[in-house]
Amino acid sequence: MCHNIIDGRYHTECSHFIAMSTKFQDCLRPNCLFSVRHVHPTACRSQSCIRLMALPTKNPIRISPSKCGDCILKTRDEVTPMVRVAGMR
């Protein structure tokens, strides 16, 4: 099946993957709806054709030893809670 390859940065401390770019990988099967070799040119109604793409593959092109931006903000908010200002709800 055809699938997307997602290039991105992997943060080792929090195990999050941040996408940077995406490429399309063609399976070159004649029964795949997404392939350039698909045998039915338009409006395919064949039950034998593959109509779903495979799950995207994550390709870490950058490895970061720190936490991602979201985790840094989350940690900072947990450590320093917001202080209420008098007169505001």
Image: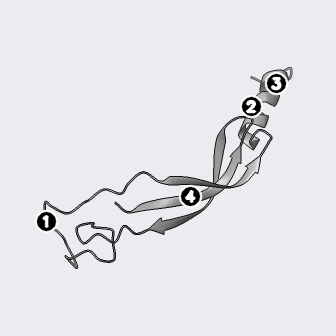
Q: Is residue 4 left or right of residue 47?
A: right
In the rendered image, residue 69, in percent from the top left (x then y), is placed at 76, 43
Type of amino acid under label 3: Met
Residue at point 13% right, 60% down? 47
Q: In terms of secondary structure, where does tag 1 sit?
A: loop
How far apart marks 1 and 2 lie (CA) works out to 49 Å
How far apart marks 1 and 4 lie (CA) works out to 30 Å
Q: Is residue 24 left or right of residue 50?
A: right
Of callouts 4 and 2, the N-terminal one:
4
Q: In terms of secondary structure, where does tag 4 sit?
A: strand
Of callouts 1 and 4, the N-terminal one:
4
Q: Which residue is mark 3?
A: 82
Q: Is residue 83 left or right of residue 9?
A: right
Residue at point 77% right, 38% down? 67
In the rendered view of the protein, which quadrant contains the N terminus?
A: bottom left
How far apart marks 3 and 2 lie (CA) works out to 13 Å
The mark closer to the camera, 4 or 2, is 4
The mark closer to the camera, 3 or 1, is 1
Q: Which residue is mark 2?
A: 74
Label annotation for residue 6: 4
In depth, the one of 46 and 86 nearer the eye is 46
Residue at point 26% right, 59% down? 51
- Circle 3 packing at 10 Å, graded few (<14), some (14-19), many (20+), is few
In depth, the one of 85 and 9 nearer the eye is 9
Q: Which residue is mark 1?
A: 46
